């Protein structure tokens, strides 16, 4: 009988324990709007866009950033729960065994044993007179805003870095094509120089010089191969696929962005994630300072119990076994060893530190924007100059071929002119890619904002 009673009560208590919530891990990142595909489509490169879609679907950093947001959303809910009443069941079943040593005056209670069935529902609620719990919830919401901006910063950084690597990979591909052509030309030059040496028209030093230059060109090709393979491996990590085929456009099909504004207002930095994070952090610590001040004030807790208390199971549900109690519990720490004052000073120092970081972030944002603009302008000008130089070298190469046709220039002269053209072509390729990458750097510095519309949003 006693075992049945115990099992019944345990079953009642078990029914009050909530089942663990089912967790759902997102299979993709949360915010596709942070990818800003409208901006990346301006590069007119379908392969770039498709790779960025794969990045959004597979990248582990983006998934973890989404999970951090979800974690902090639950932390806000946990803090908000402190603003609500707390209700719980804490039942007890025990065997009370008393000895005959109990005595009331001349009357002595003999030894006895009995069961006690105690099933109270307890409720408590802290009256938030001073608004401390509400302020704590507001502080947690600002912390959530910081995490959301960190997630957005992750999107901007990953997409920008991936796009820069993508164009660097196109440059490496084109460099390999040009380098192979350079090696082919230099091999012909070495062969013809050796022929000249055989008939006594040049010295051995000239042959050795050409051979040394050929080896340096091959070494440079090895560096380009290493760069290409390293970029492919890095981009596979972005795409979370160790065997992914990095599809890319050939160099001649890429286009430059033109018409980007060359001057921006300093208000641009207000869209940067780091600026918004520091702004939220100031608000968060401001709430914490207010909470620390309210720690000096008394707290008032409403509490109550309703339930059943009996010594016999058959009387457990009788009216005599019913119990009810309620009251208010004021509490005030008289002495806490200076802990509360230290906490208040700590939060004030943290607030001053947050203000300093906020002002530093503004300066850093302005510097990044200005540096991005300088790099963009320089890259644009360098590309123009290298394009003009390539045109002039193209004319020189054409003239050398024309001269060779009429017999006023040798085949070696044509090969040297072609070699010079290939080298200038490499400079032109490098500057064109640098120009594209500079627009990505400027986009990143501006907080992931469409550079064509950036002054419209201010």
Image (cartoon, rainbow, N blue to C red):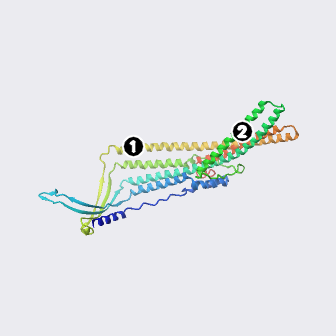
Q: Quadrant of residue 378?
A: top right
The residue nearer to you, when weighing 355 against 389, is 389
The numbered mark, 1 or 2, whose residue comes first in the sequence reads: 2
- Residue 83 position, x and y percent, is 39, 57
The residue nearer to you, when weighing 307 against 348, is 307
Secondary structure category for the residue under label 2 = helix
In this rendering, position of residue 360 left or right of residue 178: left
Give how far apart the Cα atoms at labels 1 and 2 are.
65 Å
Residue found 22% across the figure and 63% down from its top = 114
Give the answer, above or below, for where 41 lies relative to 9: above
Residue found 30% across the figure and 50% down from its top = 332
Q: What residue sits right under mark 2 in the picture?
A: 217
Give the answer, above or below, for where 90 lies relative to 254: below
In this rendering, position of residue 425 left or right of residue 59: right
Residue 219 numbered tag: none
- Residue 435 position, x and y percent, is 67, 45
- Residue 128 position, x and y percent, is 36, 55
In this rendering, position of residue 7 left or right of residue 36: left
Residue 345 numbered tag: 1
Label 1 crowd (10 A; few <14 / some 14-19 / many >=20) = some
Label 2 crowd (10 A; few <14 / some 14-19 / many >=20) = some
């Amino acid at each position: 009988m006693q075992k049945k009673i115990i099992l019944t009560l345990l079953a009642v208590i078990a029914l009050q324990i909530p089942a663990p919530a089912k967790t759902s891990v997102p299979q993709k990142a949360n915010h596709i709007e942070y990818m800003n595909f409208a901006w990346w489509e301006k590069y007119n490169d379908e392969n770039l866009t498709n790779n960025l879609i794969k990045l959004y679907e597979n990248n582990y950093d983006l998934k973890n950033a989404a999970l951090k947001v979800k974690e902090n959303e639950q932390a806000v809910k946990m803090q908000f729960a402190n603003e609500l009443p707390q209700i719980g069941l804490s039942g007890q079943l025990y065997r009370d065994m008393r000895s005959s040593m109990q005595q009331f005056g001349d009357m002595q209670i003999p030894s006895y044993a009995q069961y006690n069935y105690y099933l109270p529902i307890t409720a408590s609620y802290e009256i938030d007179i001073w608004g401390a719990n509400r302020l704590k919830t507001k502080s947690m919401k600002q912390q959530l805003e910081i995490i959301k901006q960190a997630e957005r910063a992750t999107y901007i950084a990953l997409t920008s870095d991936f796009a820069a690597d993508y164009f660097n990979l196109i440059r490496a591909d084109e460099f390999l094509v040009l380098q192979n052509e350079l090696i082919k030309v230099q091999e012909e030059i070495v062969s013809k120089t050796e022929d000249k040496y055989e008939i006594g028209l040049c010295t051995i030093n000239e042959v050795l010089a050409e051979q040394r230059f050929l080896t340096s060109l091959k070494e440079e090709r090895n560096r380009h191969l290493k760069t290409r393979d390293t970029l492919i491996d890095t981009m596979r990590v972005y795409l979370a696929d160790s065997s992914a085929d990095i599809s890319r456009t050939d160099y001649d099909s890429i286009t430059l962005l033109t018409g980007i504004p060359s001057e921006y207002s300093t208000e641009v930095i207000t869209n940067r994630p780091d600026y918004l994070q520091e702004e939220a952090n100031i608000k968060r610590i401001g709430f914490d300072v207010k909470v620390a001040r309210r720690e000096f004030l008394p707290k008032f807790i409403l509490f109550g119990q309703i339930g059943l208390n009996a010594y016999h199971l058959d009387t457990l549900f009788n009216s005599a076994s019913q119990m009810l109690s309620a009251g208010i519990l004021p509490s005030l720490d008289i002495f806490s060893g200076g802990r509360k004052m230290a906490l208040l000073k700590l939060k004030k120092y943290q607030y001053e530190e947050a203000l300093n970081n906020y002002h530093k972030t503004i300066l850093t944002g302005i510097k990044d924007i200005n540096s991005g603009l300088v790099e963009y302008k320089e890259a644009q000008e360098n590309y123009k100059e290298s394009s003009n130089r390539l045109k002039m070298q193209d004319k020189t190469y054409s003239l050398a071929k024309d001269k060779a046709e009429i017999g006023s220039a040798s085949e070696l002269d044509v090969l040297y002119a072609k070699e010079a053209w290939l080298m200038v072509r490499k400079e032109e390729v490098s500057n064109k890619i640098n120009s594209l990458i500079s627009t990505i750097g400027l986009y990143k510095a501006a907080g992931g904002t469409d550079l064509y519309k950036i002054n419209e949003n201010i």
